Amino acid sequence: MHGAGLDSSVWEELRAHIQAPVLAIEFPNRGQGDNANAATTFDGYVRSATEQIRVWNKGGFILVTHSIGAVVGLKLAAQFRTELRGFVAIGSVVPQSGRSF
């Protein structure tokens, strides 16, 4: 999952080198102009990512996240415990359990 202010295109070059199915999750309202994310919430990001994973339906997977994507990824990891095979956080700050930024 991409970080704040980005979209899934940040993963395109890397995707070309992965010889397995890849789902590049797209957060809601990306690329829709100024203030497009004004009404987007953290829970909305989680819901959107959850739905994309369910529709993708590939079974076990590894979450690779960047920036805010890692915080969303932690919620997804809890939801998909049986399917999750690994978790990678790149350039991310993840709060301690029970704490916030």
Image (spheres, grey):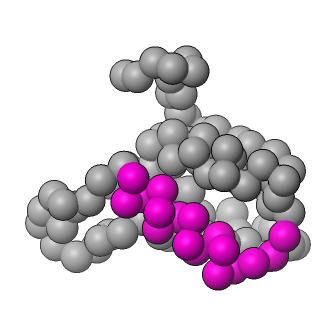
Task: Locate the C terminus by quadrant.
Answer: top left
Q: Position of residue 13 (x, y in %)?
A: 64, 67
Q: In this view, does 19 lie above or below 82?
A: below
Q: Where is residue 26 in the image (x, y as percent from the top left)?
A: 47, 69
Q: Is residue 37 above or below residue 79?
A: below
- Residue with the most extreme bottom position: 55
Image-quadrant location for residue 59: bottom right
Asked whether residue 64 appears in the rendered view, the answer is no
Q: Which residue is drawn at 16% across and 58% down?
A: 38
Query: Is 13 included in the stretch rendered in magenta?
Result: no
In the drawing, does residue 31 fall left or right of residue 60?
left
User: Which of 13 and 42 lies nearest the eye of the viewer?
Assistant: 42
Q: Which residue is drawn at 30% across and 53% down?
A: 41
Q: Which residue is drawn at 45% across and 43% down?
A: 68
Task: Locate the N terminus by quadrant.
Answer: bottom right
Q: Which residue is drawn at 45% across and 50% down?
A: 3
Q: What stretch is highlighted in magenta?
A: 43-59
Q: In this view, does 101 lie above or below 73?
A: above
Asked whether residue 82 appears in the rendered view, the answer is yes
